[in-house]
Amino acid sequence: MKFTGKVWKFGADIDTDAIIPARYLNTSDPEELAKHCMEDADPEFVNKVSPGDIILADKNFGCGSSREHAPISIKGAKVSCVVAKSFARIFYRNSFNMGLPIFESEEAYDKCDEGDVIEVDADNGVIRNITKGIEFNVAPIPPFMQQLIEDGGLMAHIEKRGK
Amino acid sequence: MGMTISEKILAKHAGVKSVEPGEIISVKVDIALGNDITAPIAIKEFKRAGAQKVFDKGRVALVPDHFAPNKDIASAEQCKILRDFAKEQDIENYFETGEMGVEHALLPEQGIVTPGDVIIGADSHTCTYGALGAFSTGVGSTDLAAAMVTGETWFKVPESMKFVYTGTLPKWVDGKDLILYTIGKIGVDGALYRSMEFTGPVIDSLPMDDRFTMANMAIEAGGKNGIIAPDAITKTYVEGRMKRPPVYYSSDADAVYSEVIEIDCSSLSPQVAFPHLPSNTRAVEEAGNVAIDQVVIGSCTNGRISDLRKAAAVLKGKKVAKYLRLIVIPATQQIYRQAMEEGLFEIFLDAGAAISTPTCGPCLGGHTGILAAGERSLATTNRNFVGRMGSPDSEVYLASPAVAAATAVKGVIASPEEVA
């Protein structure tokens, strides 16, 4: 797994209401949800982001509600992956379950600026800041989560391996 | 080595003698819950996987409570997906508008969730049932779909944090204040991935409704679950109510905790969480002069009968401040009826409050009390994120029912001491 894209930075404790406000939760259509991705954190985000771009956040990204609409809207907005210092647990779980790649890195947030182009090289556990020519470690994905990804998400995992 | 109550429940449901923090386990699920926001995605995934039948039609609960009674056409379509699926699968725990209540008040009241259970719900406040001594946690829609198919889910066994509440609770300080103070102390990720176990002499005498309030907000500290070991108070609540026999667990004396936090409650004041995080708390007397446009009393956090009684005690014989809207939402039909029969509705109506049918409504900015730009609400709900109750330029303050009632009378954030 390798993702290259431009960085959009967000602060600490970005909650799921900021990622996809509840006023849009009367649908679960990914295209509809994508139109409002990150709206209450940055109303202009959907107009600025390009396919493949990367969200880079401080600690506790995705805190709050269990709405899977949050990772769905991010994926729908064609963001390739999210890197954060840490993730709230339900968001973390949801992302693996429905196939949004997410990575934990303590350093990346502190050492990258918005607009930098970075490459997340999950296979080698490295994030390279191409703009600045520096690199840092990414926390390895736990083996069980790796298996979920390889199987294509939770439902595919269950179908493949039974209960 | 001893185990915590959470570890014991998980071990039992994994069919093993013991578990340790960090272990990945597969556990049997006693109840799997979804609502009108989250279940439609789960049902879609369920069908896409080619599943025919849910694992047990008595162990799936579907509660259309968020945007119900249907607030618009799109919400009506979402609720219809639940209704159609409930009919098709003959789901026993489906609650139509008219019998529906806010899910986390409804399921314990109806005896659907039981001490000793493992419960997952596609709603983050599923942690509420930990108040009964169950392991209960929020998940996403796909996890719910998987559990509806297999009757199982996977967990990483969490480390446990022990909170010891000592001293005695001052007047006007209740479970809401304890949990707000705790979140203020440890932060919104202070318990990330961990179990929060609430203990101590204050908890030992804390009424059941307050315990639900505390466990309900464990997620606001990032906790995987909040839990209180069952005792005589739990057993009194449970007796004659539960559909399945309860199993009572408690932590071993030599159980291992990643952290023990002691909180002396004797000098606590009622708490208010300022925008835009539940951890942004301060004592009500330090709130300053904050004018409020709307007060909401209700939700899965504070919509139970004792919450309404506390609010009514402050509101009795008083009037809501001019230009302030007070919205009272009993969390279930049973609570609604009880409040009516106890004469609480008369107090609310005399004060100038609007009383709503049970719904999550304004808590998540759905309906029945949405804020305009620049408006402020003080609510007994659980989240005060940007835009939570309406406009991204509005503000939400979180507090107990007593503080909410006092604020409704004064028009500014106020202590019940100033009003009663």
Image: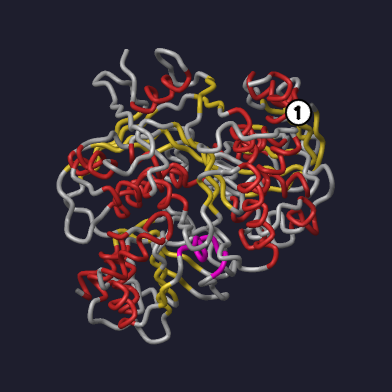
Q: Quadrant of residue B7?
A: top left
Residue B86: % across, % down = 61, 47
Q: Image point 72% across, 58% down: which residue?
A: A36
Residue B384: x and y, percent? 48, 59
Please say if B362 is above or below A64: below
Residue topped by disc 1: A152
Q: Nearer the viewer, residue B353 or B262?
A: B353
Query: Is residue B364 one of those drawn in magenta?
Result: yes
Q: Is residue A43 above or below residue B232?
A: below
Tell me the magenta residue range.
B358-367
Q: Secondary structure at mark 1?
A: loop
Instruction: Tally the numbered discs.
Output: 1
> Going by the picture, which residue comes out furthest to the bottom?
B322
Where's the N terminus of chain B, which quadrant? top left
Q: Residue drawn 47% across and 56% down?
A: B383
Assess whether residue B119 is covered by the magenta stretch: no
Q: Residue B390: percent from the left, percent from the top?
A: 57, 68
Residue at 69% in and 37% down? B46
Looking at the rendered structure, the kind of residue marked 1 is Gly
Query: Residue at coordinates 56% horizontally, 65% vertically from top-left?
Result: B69
Closer to the camera in the image, B97 or B301:
B97
Left/right placement of residue B39 relative to residue B194 reads: right
Q: A33 or B116, which is in the foreground? A: B116
The answer to whether residue B232 of the structure is visible from this angle is yes
Above-or-below relation of B217 to B362: above
